[in-house]
Image (tube, rainbow, N blue to C red):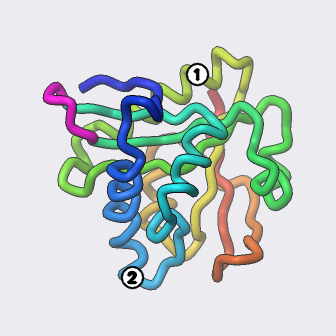
Amino acid sequence: MRIEPFDPRRDDVGAVTALLHAAYGRYAALGYEYRAATQDETRTLERLTTGLGLIARGDDGSLLGTVTYYALPPARDAQFVAWYRRADVGSFGQFAVVPASQGTGIGVALLDAIGQRARDDGKNELACETLLANQPLVAYYHRRGFRSVATFEWDDVRGECVVLSKAL
């Protein structure tokens, strides 16, 4: 496996969008509202290129996972998540692994890659948010050293969200 920056001249944004739909679709089926489960290609591309979009590929070139790292939070995120406005915090979103490959270390490798990038950017914390009600996903982050630091609500998503952060 290799992890490389998303390149819109090389990478198929439609395939990344399909990956996000597949990975977040299982949560949507349980009633959780995640934008990544239904977003269109324009939104995927915007999120990938607003930050540092990374792609995990198999040795055969297949798309295995993705994550987007933000040294500075997108304006909308900063509006709702005060933790992201801290100068020592990097954040990430659009974190997904092909469902059939989940549990194989791809997600951990993606988190390690953005953690290193955040350290290189002088950050002391790496943070994300998810729905508080999705306790299996919250537990996933806790197992990887993240802790809950705040809660908030988006204006267009039902349910309280939790901000998770990990000291680097």
- Which residue: 37% across, 52% down? 14
Report x, y in % for residue 9.
43, 30
Where 122 falls versus 24 (above or below)?
Answer: above
Q: Amino acid at mark 1?
A: Arg
* Relative depth, front residue between 65 and 161: 65
Farthest-out residue, top: 120
- Which residue: 31% across, 63% down? 22
Quadrant of the image containing the C terminus: top right
Which residue is the site of mark 1?
117
Mark 1 vs mark 2: which is more N-terminal?
Answer: 2
Magenta residues (range):
59-63
- Which residue: 40% across, 24% down? 4
The crowd level at tag 1 (other Cα within 10 Å; few <14, some 14-19, many 20+) is some
Is there a contact, CB below 8 Å, between mark 1 and mark 2? no
User: Would residue 62 be counted in the magenta stretch?
Assistant: yes
Which residue is the site of mark 2?
30
Residue 120 appears in view: yes
Disc 1 is placed on an element classified as helix
Farthest-out residue, left: 60
Report x, y in % for residue 143.
44, 47
Residue 109 appears in view: no
